[in-house]
Image (cartoon, rainbow, N blue to C red):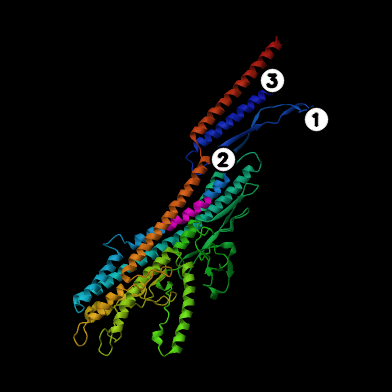
Amino acid sequence: MSLTSGLYVGTSGLQTSQNALNTTAHNLSNMETEGYVRQQVLSSDKVYNTIKKASVSVSAQQVGIGVTYAKVRQVRDYFLDLSYRREAGRSAFYDESYNAMTEVEDLLDEMNDDASFNKSLSNFWSTIEELAKTPDDTTVQRMLVQNAQSFLTNASQVYQGLIDYQNELNAHIKDQVNHINELGNRIYSLNDKIRSIEVGGVEEANDLRDERNHCLDELASLVNIKYSEDLFGSVRVAVEGVDFVASDTVYEMNVVQDTVTGFYIPYWEFAATPVSDSSKAGENVYTANDGSLLDISAARVFNMNALISSEKNTDVGKLRAMLYIRGDKVANYADIPVKPEPPEEADYAGDPVGLEAAKAKYLADLDRYEADTDYYNHTVAQSVCMNIQAEFDQLIHNVVTTVNKIFEDVSDPTTGYMCDDDGSPLQLFQKIASDGYRFEGGEWKFNEENTVDKTRTETLYSIPNLQVNPTLIREAGKMGFVFPDGTVDYETAAKLIAGFDADIYVLNPNVTTKCSINSYYSSLVSQVANSGSVYKNISDSQQATVNSIYNSREQVQGVSSDEELTSMIKFQNAYNASSRYITVIDEMLEHIIQTLAV
């Protein structure tokens, strides 16, 4: 090799070492940058100069002309990325579920004895106990009416709190869909930039790849994704099994708002079908943002009737969790199926035809109950808000119907005992003319004007449809508890006690242990606490898994200051060595030139 060629060797060493030092400095300067992945220099030989070709059995004589800066690669592990994103999405699902249970616990406020619904229920029960001692005491009767009002007021506050939480989640769902589209468009834009830089096969767009991977990390926490990179460096992303970021476009999702519930439903814009017949609205046909009608039956992003399952990956992503938690409507006690009781043969003595008819009706009711239970398990039970709304409303319904039924059983229109002004059985609780809540201005509001909203279900003995009898508010002594002959009605007051103590209720079809009205609320609170504990354990376990994978990933791709400083010393020494090599060659050339000149 000539001395002149030796200069090329030294120069290549200087250039390669300088570039390596720049890469090391870039790593150190981005140690705290979120999503940054350390970069590693790969060096290779330059093309060899062939001096002489020998025989076939002997290698050719070649001379190297230095080193080249071949590539700067990202140090990543594909499988760790895949595992991290899948488990991060599952962790986000259970984190959101646990947060929901915490929110419900705060709404129930069972730890605050001075301002909780539990206190109003206890006061109502205490008044019934006092009534059993002195049924004819008008002071106790007035207390019963006052505590009944307080009971309904506190129940309405809890129920409204659950509705408000649903509305809050609903707004977040729309925001999350918009954010998902932003991430998709950002990934698509980064694909274009990366392709344009790397198309020549010379430069690596590592910083842009870092940003794209960070977007994938964030997207994976929101929805269940699958992704792959093609030969041109573009990443294709599928969300919930449907193409989202393709090579040539982004298939955005959007939301439609149910006009009855006000809840947003995510759907794929490209899969929705325009509808011209406005009479079909409501049958998976909704009004889009531009006012047109769309059939989204085949365009829904999520199947919300799917049971939550890790095996089927229906427990991945924050957005899915929020949809499950919110549910698809405001629930009430009617959403909890009640198991029918078989007919008692003793009640049909001497009436075999009636008994057979009763048995046939029981079997039909049982079939309907099983179908309703299956629907409940696939919809209401999987929604934190809907399930608590239904179970809580069922408690109020049980209290109201129990008290009213006892009053109705003893009412006597002929004597006027326990009758209202119009001669009907006296009721402590009444339905109001309103259908409770209406959807207006993007949220549920109580119908203070008592106007019936025909889009809602028929009026039920449900929290928003209840009031204390105005007659008793004006005149609590109307109850009397004194028969026309002047004797005190202790028996009816005792029936109220027995009605509250009877273990005949269950929280839902999946609970076999029966409880009384007095123990119902504590059972409900215990269920919420137990569910919260389960979600917390799953969330903590899942977070530990995510942290473990994250730490393993950081060991591979994270920047270590010690390692980078070691590399810096190594490349600096290599730079100095190349510099000294060039100096030696320069001195030799100078010596030869001076010698020849003489």
Q: Which of marks 2 and 3 is nearer the N terminus?
A: 3
At label 3, counting other C-alpha atoms closer than 10 Å, the crowd grade (few under 14, some 14-19, many 20 or more) is: some
Q: Earlier in the sequence, mark 3 or mark 1?
A: 3
At label 2, counting other C-alpha atoms closer than 10 Å, the crowd grade (few under 14, some 14-19, many 20 or more) is: some
Amino acid tagged 3: Leu
Vertical comparison of 179 with 395: above or below? above
Vertical comparison of 276 with 303: above or below? below
Task: Tell which residue pokes out farthest to the right in this image.
Answer: 55
Q: How much space separates mark 1 and mark 2, taking CA atoms?
A: 41 Å
Q: How much space separates mark 3 and mark 1, taking CA atoms?
A: 30 Å
Q: Position of residue 142 (x, y in %)?
A: 22, 75
Amino acid tagged 2: Val
Name the dominant secondary structure of the magenta segment. helix
The residue carrying mark 3 is: 3
Looking at the figure, which quarter contains the N terminus?
top right
Q: Which of marks 1 and 2 is nearer the N terminus?
A: 1
The residue carrying mark 1 is: 56
| Range of residues picked out in magenta | 85-98
Amino acid tagged 1: Val
Residue 527 magenta: no
The residue carrying mark 2 is: 75
Looking at the figure, which quarter contains the C terminus?
top right
Q: What element carries label 2?
A: loop
Q: How much space separates mark 2 and mark 3, taking CA atoms?
A: 38 Å
Label 2 vs label 3, nearer the camera: 2
